[in-house]
């Protein structure tokens, strides 16, 4: 179930983020009210002269709150996932090391070395 929640929450987070960006770009700046007083057409909008500002600011605030909640939820889900057990190389089975070659004794005389060499 957890595998299904994370992608859905991530998709919602991206869509809400795009919505916040779109709503911020649609809103008029503070200097736009002066233009409406001289007939720039803002007073004849769909929501009225002040209705669009109230609606867009409320919608932006709601989407910002949803964006904040999805951010916290994604952080919680990412933090609650089990940690990896380390590197991949730690889980590889290794073969036992080959035995070290025998070292001839250091106190052996020179004559015994000549006898050990096969002919």
Image: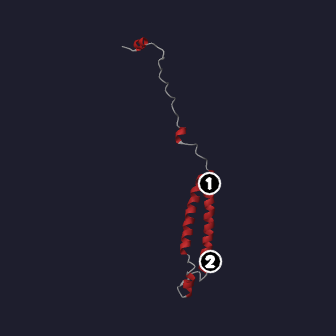
The quarter of the displayed image where residue 34 is located:
bottom right
Left or right for 118, reference 83 = left
Residue 77: give its label. 1
Colour pattern: secondary structure
Left or right for 80, reference 95 = right
**x and y, in percent, of residue 116 in the image:** 42, 13
Residue at x-position 63% and y-position 62%: 69
As drawn, the residue found furthest toward the bottom would be: 38
**x and y, in percent, of residue 77 in the image:** 62, 54
Left or right for 117, reference 43 = left
**x and y, in percent, of residue 17 in the image:** 56, 65
The quarter of the displayed image where residue 33 is located:
bottom right
Q: Say which quadrant the C terminus sits in.
A: top left
Q: Is residue 105 above or below residue 36?
A: above
Residue 53 visible (yes or no): yes
**x and y, in percent, of residue 1 in the image:** 61, 52
| First in residue order: circle 1 vs circle 2 | 2
Q: Secondary structure at mark 1?
A: helix
Residue 1 visible (yes or no): no
Q: Secondary structure at mark 2?
A: helix
Report the Cα–Cα distance between label 1 and label 2: 35 Å
Q: Residues within 10 Å of mark 1 (few under 14, many from 20)?
A: few
Q: Is residue 91 above or below residue 69?
A: above
Q: Which residue is mark 2?
A: 54
Residue at x-position 59% and y-position 79%: 52
In depth, the one of 100 and 27 nearer the eye is 100
């Amino acid at each position: 179930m957890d595998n299904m929640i994370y992608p859905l929450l991530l998709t919602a987070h991206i869509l809400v983020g795009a919505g916040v960006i779109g709503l911020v770009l649609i809103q008029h700046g503070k200097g736009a009210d002066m233009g409406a007083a001289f007939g720039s057409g803002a007073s004849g909008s769909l929501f009225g002269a002040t209705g669009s500002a109230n609606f867009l600011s409320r919608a932006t605030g709601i989407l910002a709150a949803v964006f904040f909640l999805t951010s916290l939820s994604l952080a919680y889900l990412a933090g609650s996932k089990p940690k990896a057990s380390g590197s991949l190389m730690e889980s590889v089975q290794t073969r036992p090391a080959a035995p070290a070659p025998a070292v001839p004794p250091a106190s052996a005389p020179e004559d015994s070395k000549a006898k050990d060499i096969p002919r």
